[in-house]
Image: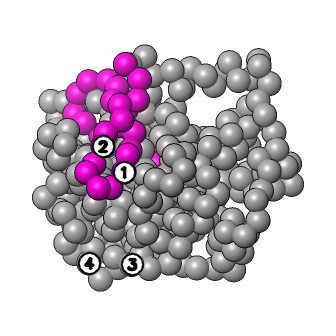
Amino acid sequence: MRLSAKRRGMWNGYLNLHLQGPTSTLFAGQGRVDVVRLGQGEPIVLVPGLAGGWKLVAPLARRLAKDHEVILFGLRGDDGIVGAPRPASVDEYATDLAEMIGHLGLERPTVMGVSFGGAVALKLAVERPNLVGSLIVQGAEATFHSGLGARIAKGVLERFPLPMDNRFVNQFFNLLHGAKPESEALADFVVERCWETDQSVMAGRLQALESFDVSEALWRIDAPTLVLAGTKDVVVPPARQEALAKAIAGSRFHAIEGAGHIAFLTHGADTVREVTRLIRDQHPAAC
């Protein structure tokens, strides 16, 4: 399911970030992650999800970069380097994130994580609350519910090489939209970005989620928090995301009507509005 040349051109603008390009940052003994910075203003660290890396969240980054500095954080394993060390737990991904924040000299930035990145952001916020100025999560919850679908997905990803051009397999990615994709171009963009993450990396992250549980530590979060949920999210139902918001003191929950698990793509304007609102409340002079 490759993009045609015409439709590829429609989306290439999201990947051309008009910077010096991705900056490879080496963390001693832990491997490599990509860090991309764009825009100016109050910093927002954007943590991507299970698959697709920073390129999948690039459209949201470009929207946010009109008024903020956005730091796109590439998870270890998304660089495609064979044999490179990969985190075995959400804790290790959060440690990578903490080291990146320290390396760049960021002082309590806004940290926004989507899907798996939301789990990483939550782990950082409970383990290193002094590093997070504001917290935003979308498509995540405090503990992983390992349903039949997740167990099947992990088993298949671990055992069977899957072709990225198989239309039947790729139909599962359409579930991320929550409804029929608004365009074939967007559907193809999501599929191509997701397959840029090796399926063994996806399986490893699903495995890491099985031991993820911060439900008893949410009281440690010391930052204004926004929980965003698509009303049609079938991966993490909105009721469970609302429960997360209720468990974090002083947090705010916002449901994005009609959105699925990738609301940051399909409902980018709504997402940016809510993110900007949170930052404006904390830094009135910055917006």
Residue 255 visible? The answer is: no
How far apart are the alpha carbons under marks 2 and 1?
A: 6 Å
**Residue wearing tag 3:** 213
Picture coordinates of residue 116 (x, y %)? 48, 60
Between label 2 and label 4, give the one nearer the viewer: 2
Pointer 1 local density, CA inside 10 Å: few below 14, some 14–19, many at least 20 = some
Pointer 3 local density, CA inside 10 Å: few below 14, some 14–19, many at least 20 = some
Q: Which of marks 4 and 1 is nearer the N terminus?
A: 1
Q: What residue type is labelled 4?
A: Ala
How far apart are the alpha carbons under marks 3 and 1?
A: 25 Å
In the rendered structure, the answer to whether residue 136 lies left or right of residue 270 reads left
According to the image, what is the colour scheme of the structure? one colour
Q: Which of marks 3 and 1 is nearer the N terminus?
A: 1
How far apart are the alpha carbons under marks 2 and 4?
A: 30 Å
CB of mark 2 within 8 Å of CB of mark 1? yes
Between label 4 and label 1, give the one nearer the viewer: 1
Q: Give, as a single range, the part of the protein colored magenta.
A: 20-49
The front one of 163 and 17 is 163
At a point 86% along the width and 54% down the height, the residue shown is: 168
